[in-house]
Amino acid sequence: MARKPADQSVNQQDILIAAADVLQRNGYEATTMKDIAAEVNLTAASLYHHFKNKDALLLAVLEAGLELVISRLEPIMRSDKSCDQQLREMIGVHIISLTENTAVGAAMVFEIRSLMASNGSGSAAEVTRRKKFFARRDYFENLYRQVIQKGVEQRIFRAVDVPIFAKTLLGAHNWVSVWYKPDGRLNGQQIATMMADTFLQALKF
Amino acid sequence: MARKPADQSVNQQDILIAAADVLQRNGYEATTMKDIAAEVNLTAASLYHHFKNKDALLLAVLEAGLELVISRLEPIMRSDKSCDQQLREMIGVHIISLTENTAVGAAMVFEIRSLMASNGSGSAAEVTRRKKFFARRDYFENLYRQVIQKGVEQRIFRAVDVPIFAKTLLGAHNWVSVWYKPDGRLNGQQIATMMADTFLQALKF
Amino acid sequence: MARKPADQSVNQQDILIAAADVLQRNGYEATTMKDIAAEVNLTAASLYHHFKNKDALLLAVLEAGLELVISRLEPIMRSDKSCDQQLREMIGVHIISLTENTAVGAAMVFEIRSLMASNGSGSAAEVTRRKKFFARRDYFENLYRQVIQKGVEQRIFRAVDVPIFAKTLLGAHNWVSVWYKPDGRLNGQQIATMMADTFLQALKF
Amino acid sequence: MARKPADQSVNQQDILIAAADVLQRNGYEATTMKDIAAEVNLTAASLYHHFKNKDALLLAVLEAGLELVISRLEPIMRSDKSCDQQLREMIGVHIISLTENTAVGAAMVFEIRSLMASNGSGSAAEVTRRKKFFARRDYFENLYRQVIQKGVEQRIFRAVDVPIFAKTLLGAHNWVSVWYKPDGRLNGQQIATMMADTFLQALKF
DNA sequence: TATGAATGAGGGTTCATTCAT
DNA sequence: TATGAATGAACCCTCATTCAT
């Protein structure tokens, strides 16, 4: 009544990666636990040994993706390079992250709403964790705002509305994970360079 | 899009508007026929007198939104203004459309995937209609590409990769319908101006 | 994709009766919606047109059973007969109700705990309804307490601890629906008479 | 039932006690192996080293409870006291057992149905064991019948229908384990006395 | 047109149970 | 003995869709 799998057991990381992939392809609502499980050769029921429920899995996927990008952005922020150089590098690693791992990016674009829909429900711990995620998301966006703000103050960038500019930039980035195809005309690095050029140019006086 | 029939019964337009609204709030998968029906004081069953099925309804919503924007973009394209002026105005009406009618915009951002997921299924007529929609979507994106391309050729814009720049611009626009709040700090017109500034600046030599 | 049933549609009453029957046989947890549906030639899904969920159905069953008994008890209470006569008649109709409809009685015995288990969950309306049910249950028990109390005060009954005596009596009654078999040695009327004798005797000086 | 092994590992007794407790609180179907395991700091899987399956565990709980009561009832039966005194004492120890160990009592009230539901299934050994349990249950009820019968024959009790009177008495008793609260107005001894009074009175001429 | 009732399909989730470690 | 991981089975419930009225 309980068969053993041929290979060894999967870990949460494997599941997260698979889930991100499926989620990106199908979207949260259209993705079934079975779909995700199949991707790692498990039964849907088995997923519940690793994640409390579908919401928790989604949240874990988003968290992982967000933390990955943050972990790559922060060192750039902490460097003593000039603002324009910092922004250029940030856009670079961000786009590269997105193209290397479309799953994470697309999940973030599309599924935040699903996450918000589940707001209010769940245990206190779940609510807390969700709040923390949104706080991290704001922190992430703030990294961009900070460097833009700093550049404006240092007269390196022209005087733009920082929140709007950040949203503009992030929207453009997010969309990459929707249209990017690994076998397309341009690779991630090339796209990153172009987009960095675009936004740096947009900030010139 | 604003004609008012004499009688009081709901028509397809009413349903489309309501559907777009609900779809934006909840997303395609999370939106039930009952939800949409409730918005126009009908039962789910009654919706089937107006639309063949949920997919057809979604498609109709997307079509309406897309055609609205196209209908506002084409006159600008056909004018004899300079490329930069054309692009500025296009961005303007696009953003305004999005902020005036978040429903349509968000539907376009989020639900294209759902539509693609249903690809291959359905009658020949449905498949044809879906194909036509995607063709229109490409046409829409092409409007942007054309004006950018023309500007580049006329040395009014710097030499950018046109497809990538168009995607960048569209990504930024689409994202507006996600974060825009009618009671926010800035209205649609202000946002439109700022984003136009950004992208026009980005195209300067 | 949606077949019609051969016979005409069922109403809530039919479902309640069927549900009470199945619930009694299997217990709440062991009873599936499918089981109940099958009893009225419906699909499980169809039940949800009549009751919001399994809990609501259970509650409706219990309510119906309780109200039935209360409706038979109250006229006796309101009569101007002597306490001992009143109590005798109450025991009579109660036992008869139980043997005529073991389902309801057993459900009441066994499933109150299930109902309590679901306490706190659900919408405010559900909680309210549940509270009201428990209030009615208390009212029901109070009918017995009142007549006993009155009898004690009028020196018709010996001085017993009223709450304990009522519990004793109710426990004996409830258990009837567990062991009573329609084709047993004695019918409901006979059992009722014997139990009335027992408890009236127990109250003599 | 209260021996304590030197080591600290759990033994079947510990599990039985814990299981009885959880079963009483939640009922058989609503109680999970995990629930029971948690009560003794084990995992569900570990329980299977002690009991073949959930049914076996339930049966063991019921057996233990039943045997406990029987073991306390038999000495009274074997004494040469008068019938009325014997019955009084039997009611006393029975109620006390119930209030001291609600778990066992409630399990007996509520879970017999679950046990019967599993009838027919299982190995021959299991069926045998189940049959034996039911035989013991009948034996237990017979203890009451015997003393009542004897009393009637000796003209100590009035002529009642013995089976019905026994059911009446047992129903009242079983119900105690449902409503008894350790911190209630009366303790087990007081309740026992009152109920003994009631039933002895009911048997008077 | 509108709808109440019904249903097949399926999704999330739970749970008893197994087995390798 | 103990357990983590896994699973088949089943359950509750939802939903798009149909059809008689």
Image (cartoon, coloured by chain):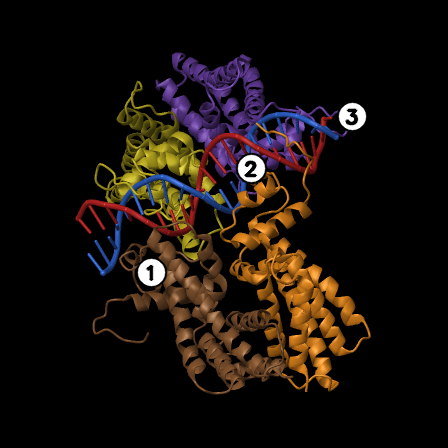
Chain colours: A yellow, B purple, C orange, D brown, E red, F blue
Where is residue B76, by image quadrant?
Answer: top right
* Residue B6: assigned label: 3
Q: Check the image and report above or below for A88 versus A122.
A: above
User: Is C90 in front, or is A28?
Assistant: C90
Is C203 on the left-hand or right-hand side of B107? right
Q: Residues within 10 Å of mark 1 (few under 14, many from 20)?
A: some
Question: Residue A174: x, y in percent?
Answer: 39, 33
Q: Residues within 10 Å of mark 3 (few under 14, many from 20)?
A: few
Q: Check the image and report above or below for F5 versus D146.
A: above
Mark 1 and mark 3: Cα distance apart in space:
69 Å
Q: Secondary structure at mark 2?
A: loop
Q: Amino acid at mark 3?
A: Ala
* Residue B187: assigned label: 2
Asked whether disc 1 touches disc 3, contact meaning CB atoms under 8 Å apart, the reply is no
Q: Are marks 1 and 3 on the same chain?
A: no
Circle nearer the viewer, 1 or 3: 1
Q: Secondary structure at mark 1?
A: helix
Is B26 on the left-hand or right-hand side of B203? right
Residue at figure coordinates x 62%, y 64% from the top left: C134
Q: Check the image and report above or below for F14 versus C128.
A: above
In primary-sequence order, the first of circles 3 and 2 is 3
Question: Residue A175: x, y in percent?
Answer: 40, 30
* Residue D37: assigned label: 1
How many badges with numbers are in the image?
3
Q: Residues within 10 Å of mark 2 (few under 14, many from 20)?
A: some
Instruction: Inspect this view and state whether residue D30 appears.
Output: no
Circle nearer the viewer, 3 or 2: 3
* Residue A53: assigned label: none
User: Is C133 in front, or is B2?
Assistant: C133
Q: Amino acid at mark 1?
A: Ala
